[in-house]
Amino acid sequence: MLTVDSVSVSLGGERVLDAVSLSVAAGEVVAVFGPSGSGKSTLLRAVAGLVDVDSGRVLVDGVDVTAVPTHRRSVGMVFQDEQLFPHRDVAGNVSFGLEMAGVERGERDSRVSEVLSAVGLDGFGGRDVSTLSGGEAKRVALARSLAPRPTVLLADEPLTGLDADLHDRLAVEVRSVLRASGTTTLWVTHDRAEAELVADRSVSLLDLGARA
């Protein structure tokens, strides 16, 4: 479903990724772990089309999307700092991608309710995002990314900043949500234990061709 084929990326004249290759099967959750500064976020941004690649290809569902704009790649992204819209309530945040895709109101509302239920936030649609706990905000960010049914979900250390107990509990919950939805996911983290909790398979970025 996702193929990263010998992708190299340079930033500021420095090679960050060097011929990185990785495949993620349909419905599989693969975690890439590595130390801070090893290029994990750069890998996700290259897949999403947010940074240019020097060489190599990115394929989504067998289609070469290396030169395709981000909004046409059918990828969703969960950021480590959630990046929720403060002027929208929970439902408004979750519906954003559906609105951008032109989904009609009734279908949009139904999908928002569905994904909020999937992440354990039934009844939260009208909540102001500023009132959410850290764990709730991360669930909303996940729901927003899942709502448009992306072909591939990209998760950039989305559990950062939680205390240990909540972190581990949410990791298990997120694993269940991703399995239930059958979402093909590339998850990056500096925490190898987190990678093993969430993913079907985990791999070190340094083994793939990062320049630490």
Image (tube, rainbow, N blue to C red):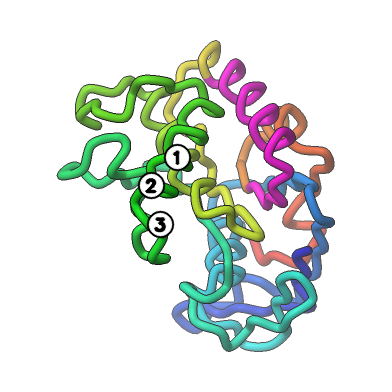
Report whether 179 appears left or right of 10.
Answer: right
| Within-10-Å neighbours for mark 1: few <14, some 14–19, many 20+ | few
Report whether 204 appears left or right of 65.
Answer: right
| Within-10-Å neighbours for mark 3: few <14, some 14–19, many 20+ | many
Magenta region: which residues? 167-187
Report whether 16 appears left or right of 136.
Answer: right
Write the residue at 57% across / 48% down.
Answer: 155
Residue that mark 3 sits on: 97
| Within-10-Å neighbours for mark 2: few <14, some 14–19, many 20+ | few
Name the mark nearer the viewer: 1 or 3: 1
Residue 52 placed where, x, y %? Answer: 53, 82
Residue 106's mark?
A: 2
Dot 1 and dot 3 residues touching (CB under 8 Å)? no
Residue 137 placed where, x, y %? Answer: 37, 30
| Residue 16 found in image quarter | bottom right
User: Camera-side residue: 133 or 125?
Assistant: 125
Quadrant containing the C terminus is bottom right
- Amino acid tagged 3: Gly
- Amino acid tagged 2: Gly
